[in-house]
Image: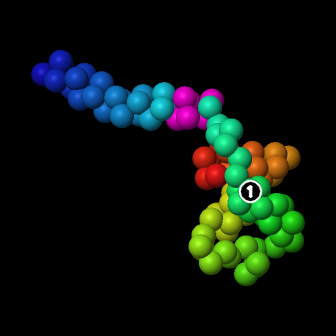
Amino acid sequence: MRAITLKKINDAWVPWILFVVTAAIYLCFPTKNYYWDGIAFAQMIEDAPKLNASLVHPNHLIYNVVGYISYRAVQTGIKPQGHYSSANLE
């Protein structure tokens, strides 16, 4: 009976271990392909004084809004381009 309980506990950790390993690899290798639209969106986020309609783009309705919220929430001094790279949004 105890072996079954330990097996269930070990099986429960497998998805979390895979998630942490995958996230670590993902964050260690940010994108290096900077396209003009990603640079422009990052500049729009940095220049926006507050969350407003200027952040909404016709082809990317929530792209800048999510970027702005994450950029302002973290406030680490990293430019928006760094946030986009780490989130691989660019």
Residue 69 seen in this snapshot: no
The N terminus sits in image quarter: top left
- The span picked out in magenta is 23-28
In which quadrant of the rendered view does residue 18 lie?
top left
Q: Nearer the viewer, residue 74 or 38?
A: 38
Q: Position of residue 23 (x, y in %)?
A: 52, 35
Identity of the residue furthest to the top in this view = 3
> 78 above or below 72?
above
Q: Position of residue 8 (x, y in %)?
A: 23, 29
Residue 24 drawn above or below residue 50? above
Which structural element holds mark 1? helix
Q: Residues within 10 Å of mark 1 (few under 14, many from 20)?
A: few
- Picture residue at 63% right of the left edge, 29% below the top: 28
- Residue at (42, 28) in percent of width and height: 17
Q: Residue furthest front?
A: 36
> Is residue 26 inside the magenta stretch?
yes
Task: Indicate whether residue 24 is drawn in magenta.
Answer: yes
Choose between 74 and 61: the one closer to the eye: 61
The kind of residue tagged 1 is Trp
Report which residue position mark 1 lands on.
36
